[in-house]
């Protein structure tokens, strides 16, 4: 039963972030006018590998501090309590972080559709001044920027790089 629970939990923690990740480059594109899927994939991989390395280290540290004795047939009550507290408190803290993150994460099917339509409208020669109010609010809610600061009109757009190279995205929005 423990293995089944672990398998289900591991699948959720592994697949859910990667499912959400696929939509993040669209939000980045409306901000910077660039497609940078590779950057986000690299960040996700780095985070996954870092946390995968950190988890056993922290578990070993907690076990050591709780008095766990390697090879002992019976562990002390302090070691048992320390391990249970670590597992329960750790799970509760991570669930709380997940709930808070989910609450503030406003990207969903509807807002993603609105965002993609706006990206296409602008790519097809639409003017930022012609944005409708629903799209403006959705874009601002998803990006944290005022609408006028989107599409490269901010410090995240690497303006100096853009002056030197006319990439695919630059042509797409020209």
Image (cartoon, rainbow, N blue to C red):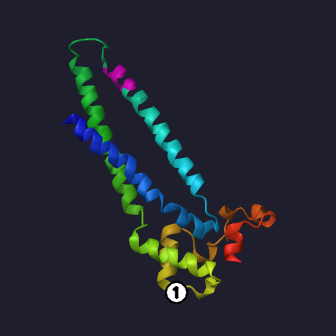
Looking at the rendered image, the quarter that the N terminus falls into is top left
Mark 1: which secondary structure? Answer: loop
Q: Judge left or right: residue 117 versus residue 12.
A: right
* Residue 37 sits inside the magenta stretch: no
Which residue sits at x=33%, y=42%? 10
Which of these two is toward me, 70 or 82? 70
**Relative image position of residue 21 (x, y in whole percent):** 47, 57
Q: What is the span of residues highlighted in magenta in the rendered image?
A: 60-66
Which residue sits at x=26%, y=32%? 85
Residue 124, picture quadrant: bottom right
**Relative image position of residue 68 (x, y in whole percent):** 30, 18
- In the displayed image of the protein, which residue is found farthest to the top? 72
Which of these two is toward me, 140 or 5? 5
Q: Find disc 1 in the rendering and name its residue.
A: 132
**Relative image position of residue 131 (x, y in whole percent):** 56, 85
Q: Judge left or right: residue 68 versus residue 27.
A: left
Question: Number of numbered discs present?
Answer: 1
- In the displayed image of the protein, which residue is found farthest to the front? 168
Decide: few, some or many residues near mark 1? Use Cα within 10 Å; few <14, some 14-19, many ≥20: few
**Relative image position of residue 25 (x, y in whole percent):** 54, 62
Above-or-below relation of 13 to 105: above
Looking at the rendered image, the quarter that the C terminus falls into is bottom right
- In the displayed image of the protein, which residue is found farthest to the right? 164
Above-or-below relation of 111 to 58: below
Which residue sits at x=45%, y=75%? 113
Which residue sits at x=49%, y=78%? 137
Magenta stretch mostly in which secondary structure?
helix
């Amino acid at each position: 039963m423990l293995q089944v629970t672990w398998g289900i939990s591991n699948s959720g923690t592994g697949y859910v972030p990667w499912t959400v990740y696929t939509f993040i480059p669209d939000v980045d594109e409306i901000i910077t006018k660039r497609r940078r899927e590779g950057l986000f994939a690299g960040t996700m991989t780095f985070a996954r590998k870092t946390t995968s390395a950190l988890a056993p280290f922290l578990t070993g540290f907690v076990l050591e501090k709780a008095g766990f004795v390697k090879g002992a047939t019976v562990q002390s009550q302090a070691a048992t309590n320390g391990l249970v507290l670590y597992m329960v408190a750790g799970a509760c803290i991570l669930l709380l972080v997940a709930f808070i993150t989910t609450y503030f994460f406003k990207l969903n099917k509807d807002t993603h559709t609105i965002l993609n339509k706006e990206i296409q409208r602008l790519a097809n020669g639409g003017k930022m001044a012609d944005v409708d109010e629903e799209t403006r609010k959705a874009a601002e809610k998803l990006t944290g920027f005022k609408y006028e600061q989107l599409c490269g009109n901010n410090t995240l757009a690497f303006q100096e790089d853009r002056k030197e190279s006319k990439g695919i995205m630059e042509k797409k929005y020209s």
